[in-house]
Amino acid sequence: MSKDKKHIIGGVLGGMGPLATVDFMSNVISLNPIQTEKDHIHLIVDQNPHVPNRQIKTSAQRNKISSLLAERAMKLEAAGADFLVMPCNTAHMFADAIKKVISIPFLHIVEETVAEISRYHSKKTTVGIMATSACLESMIYQEGLVNANRNFIIPNERIQKKCMQIIFFIKDGRDIKSMQKEMKQVAEHLIAMGAEIIIAGCTEIPLVIRDNDISVPLISSTEVLALKTIEFASGKKLKRIT
């Protein structure tokens, strides 16, 4: 990192859930090709697990979550953050509300993940989406993929229910090692339906399943956001393994 480069600070809207936020920060550390300790990324982290459940049922819940996330974003900017990230895919339903109240860049996990596929997996046209039910219902991934000229596949109702159970087992602090086989079954369901590549579109998913666990590429939204965080803060372009 150049000594003359402005010291860039990243603000992290975390805690949704806590393990996923810690995994994101671990990725920021492990994926950064540092020469000295000072090359690590300066992060201000708001690890708040008290944001209401993003699986929204009412407009009152939606308004409460939107208001809380916007308030936290403003506090991170006031604390010195030069840009913001949020390692929770579902919470990106509220990205516009966040961006309205800040004057610093917001790195959008969904947009960056879809762009990663377009950039590094351009021949993969049919994308399976593993995400929470609220994230799928919001259509943020589906719309992003359609805009990128990709087809998408989502799990059927039974398999999606299984996916949600696994995600909330992880969020609730259960034994996540036992969840790997079941999450792999969700991915295999999408592959059987024709998915050529799969998005781990919930930051809990990469905690239990990795790229080498399945027969098609698995794109971790956590890893993508970590890479973009490093690139934005350091000015370095990082190599990808494709």
Image: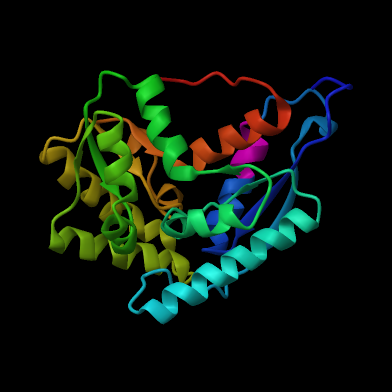
Would you say 71 lies left or right of 211 here? right
Which residue is located at x 57 percent, y 33 percent? 227
User: Which portion, as a residue range, is magenta?
Assistant: 26-31
- Magenta stretch holds residue 27: yes
As displayed, is residue 87 above or below residue 152?
below
Instruction: Give percent across and percent down for residue 158.
Output: 14, 63
Instruction: Give percent across and percent down for residue 185.
Output: 21, 50
Instruction: Give percent across and percent down for residue 177.
Output: 41, 57
Which residue is located at x 84 percent, y 33 percent? 38
Residue 29 visible to the viewer: yes
As displayed, is residue 172 above or below residue 25?
below
Would you say 34 lies left or right of 206 here? right
Query: Between 71 and 196, which is closer to the camera in this rendering?
Result: 71
- Magenta stretch holds residue 202: no
Residue 52 visible to the viewer: no
Residue 71: quarter of image? bottom right
Location of the N terminus (image quadrant): top right
Instruction: Give percent across and percent down for residue 229.
Output: 62, 37
Q: Residue furthest left?
A: 193
